[in-house]
Amino acid sequence: MVPLLAMTERPPRHSIEEWLALPEDVHVELIDGEYVKRASPAWNHGTTQFHLGSLLGPEFNRPAGSSKPGGWWIAPEVDIVLNGDGFRPDMAGWRRSRVPEMPKDWPTRLTPDWIAEVVSPGNRTHDTVTKLQRYHAAGVAHYWLLDPEQGSLHVYRHQPDGYLLVLAAQRPMRVHAEPCEAVEYAVGELLGDDPQD
């Protein structure tokens, strides 16, 4: 018979300091003191992440007021601490009007205004439920879920009671997705498809 105490013991909780001390090739996030393994990057995940940055960066990752919309700091896989949890989102952005200087602290504790995650089949629930809830609780204004397997983009806007789904689109649709609605994008291109000339 297993003692009751042994059945109810939880694994030791990890700290932010322990999470940050892990080797770079250990792909985990820290939620409620427990390590959550990130899915190993598959080809379509990496392509989607690359295309997303390539498309949004030139238009938005620049000062506002030029011939392009600008007004953002955008970066991939930045270590971010939100409400005591440690995240490394696929892409994150901060409005320059709120954060005039590029965030340089590590990990950053500045809540992003926008986060995009590329859904991995092995981590679907983590991306679509756990992170959605945690990012909302931290006050992230916009959350994008890009799903290469399903060929879809879901865009959420922060509301007091939870995220509001403001856009659900799939290939071959073209969209103006907030907070980047100033530019129209083909969903397929955001997901890593070849450009539509």
Image (spheres, helix red, strand yellow):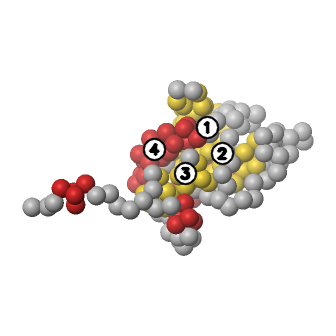
Residues at marks 1 and 3 touching, judged by CB atoms closer than 8 Å:
no
| Placement of 18 over or under 197, stated as above or below | below
- Which badge, 1 or 2, is on the more N-terminal residue? 2
Residue sitting at the far right: 66
Image x and y of residue 85, in percent? 53, 52
**Element at badge 4?**
helix
**Quadrant of the frame with the N terminus:** bottom left
Instruction: Give the residue type at disc 3.
Output: Gly
User: From where the camera sits, is residue 151 visible?
Assistant: no
Residues at marks 1 and 4 touching, judged by CB atoms closer than 8 Å:
no
Residue sitting at the far left: 1
Tell me: 71 left or right of 16.
right
Image x and y of residue 125, in percent? 41, 45
| Residue at image coords 62%, 54% | 80
Q: What numbered label is drawn on residue 130?
A: 4
- Which badge, 4 or 2, is on the more N-terminal residue? 2
Work out how far the residue at label 1 is from the one at label 4, CA to CA, in angstroms. Answer: 14 Å
- Which badge, 1 or 4, is on the more N-terminal residue? 4
Q: Nearer the viewer, residue 93 or 138?
A: 138
- Which badge, 1 or 3, is on the more N-terminal residue? 3
Image x and y of residue 93, in percent? 70, 46
Instruction: Give the residue type at disc 4.
Output: Thr
**Element at badge 3?**
loop
**Quadrant of the frame with the C terminus:** top right
User: From where the camera sits, is residue 19 visible?
Assistant: yes
Categorize mark 1 by other alpha carbons within 10 Å: few (<14), some (14-19), many (20+): some
User: What residue is shown with label 3?
Assistant: 84
